[in-house]
Amino acid sequence: MSTAGPDVDDAIRTLLLLMPRMVGRAKRLPVPAELHSLALAPRHLSLLACLLFDGESSVNELAERLEVAPTTVSLMVGELSRKGILERHEDPADRRRKLVSITAARRGAIDAWLGRSAQAWRVALEPLTAAERRTFVETLAAYERQLGGEGDPS
C-alpha cells in the first residue's frame, strides 16, 4: 500500500477480512441478563438506539429516522411496550401528540448494552473531519444497498 492509501482491490481485501470480525464482535456484546428473556430482535436495536441517543420521539419521527413506515414503528412500539421496555405518554407541549421513550426500569441496561457500540463508533469517527465522516457513512450505506440488490452495480 502506498502512503496515499490502498488501491481498490487492496481495500476490498482488507474489508473482506475486517467486516466479519467487526460483525462477530458486535454480536458478542453481551445482552444484559435483565434483557435476555425479552427476545429482542435486530429490528428492535435500531429503534432502541434512536430513543437512547435522541431521546423521546413520536412514532412518525422514529419512522423517518429508521426509514420505515409509521405502522412498522407503531407495531414495534406496541410489542416493546407490552414487554415493559418502552412507554408512550403525552407530549407536554401538545397533549394530542404521543411520545415514545425507554422506561426508566430498562434504560440503564439498554444504555450499558448499546452504549459500548456507540462509544466505539465515537472513538473511530471523532478524529475524522465532517467530510471524511460523511464519506465513510455514505460508503457503508452504498455497500449495504449493494448487498440488498438496490444499487446500480456499475
Image (cartoon, rainbow, N blue to C red):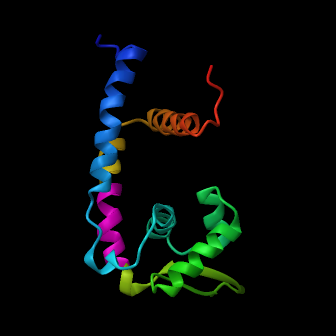
- 109 horizontally vs 61: left or right: left
- 85 horizontally vs 56: left or right: left
Give coordinates of residue 96: x percent, y percent: 73, 86
Q: From which residue to which does the magenta span run?
A: 107-118
Can residue 100 be seen here?
no
Q: Which is the main secondary structure of the residues drawn in magenta?
A: helix
In the image, what residue occupies the spot 51% across and 79% down? 80
Where does the N terminus fall, quadrant-wise? Answer: top left
Residue 148, compared with residue 153, is above or below; it is below
- State the image quarter where residue 35 is shown: bottom left
In the image, what residue occupies the spot 33% across and 63% down? 115
Residue 45, compared with residue 137, is above or below; it is below
In the image, what residue occupies the spot 64% across and 64% down? 63
Give coordinates of residue 125: x percent, y percent: 36, 42
Q: Residue extending furthest right?
A: 96
Magenta highlight on residue 113: yes
- State the image quarter where residue 114 is shown: bottom left
Residue 56, compared with residue 64, is above or below; it is below
Query: 57 or 23, which lies in front?
Result: 23
